[in-house]
Image (cartoon, rainbow, N blue to C red):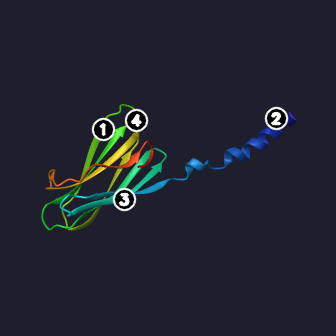
Amino acid sequence: MRLLALLTAAVLPLTAAAPASAVPTIWNWRGGQSTDGKASAWGKVYIHQMGYLVEGNLKDTQGYGCSWVILKGQDTRSGRWKSHGFYNCIPGTGTFKKDYRNALNVKVQVCRGDADRPTGQCSAWKSIMRNGGPA
């Protein structure tokens, strides 16, 4: 009985301490610019309990048209890619967030367009997260 009490006392301090994985990991990404140089995107990726959070800034330098950032994430379970677009039609910098719960890879592309969709002048796709870490 005494041995069990000693083992329990020895185990409790180990389980009460927070694991090293509880500390969030953050890294910066740069998405680049549209080919005409009038749109640019950059931000951070956060690892949290449920997966990954991509936060970003989208800068529009033009007084007409819109800047677009397209995020494309690959699902770890199905392997399929899903795209999500964010736009800014006001000169200046806007922000966006996208939560990925089961992402294996995330890529970004910066384009010009209108309020409905990107219409062209897109940058090449750039990986911002690969296999759960910085690309």
First of labels 3, 1 by sequence position: 3
Three-letter code, disc 4: Thr
Cα distance in 3D space between marks 2 and 4: 42 Å
Mark 3 surroundings within 10 Å by alpha-carbon count, few (fewer than 14), some (14 through 19), many (20 or more): some
First of labels 2, 1 by sequence position: 2
Report the side of 51 relative to 4 (left or right): left
Image location of residue 66, percent across then percent down: 17, 59
Image location of residue 106, percent across then percent down: 35, 45
Cα distance in 3D space between marks 3 and 1: 21 Å
What residue is shown with label 2?
A: 4
Q: Secondary structure at mark 3?
A: strand
Position of 11 relative to 28 (above/below): above
Q: Nearer the viewer, residue 77 or 108?
A: 108
* Residue at figure coordinates x 36%, y 59% from the top left: 43
First of labels 4, 1 by sequence position: 4
Q: Which disc number belongs to residue 76?
A: 4
Three-letter code, disc 1: Trp
What residue is shown with label 3?
A: 43
Assess whether mark 3 and mark 4 are in contact (beta carbons under 8 angstroms): no
What residue is shown with label 1?
A: 81
Report the side of 117 relative to 93 (left or right): left
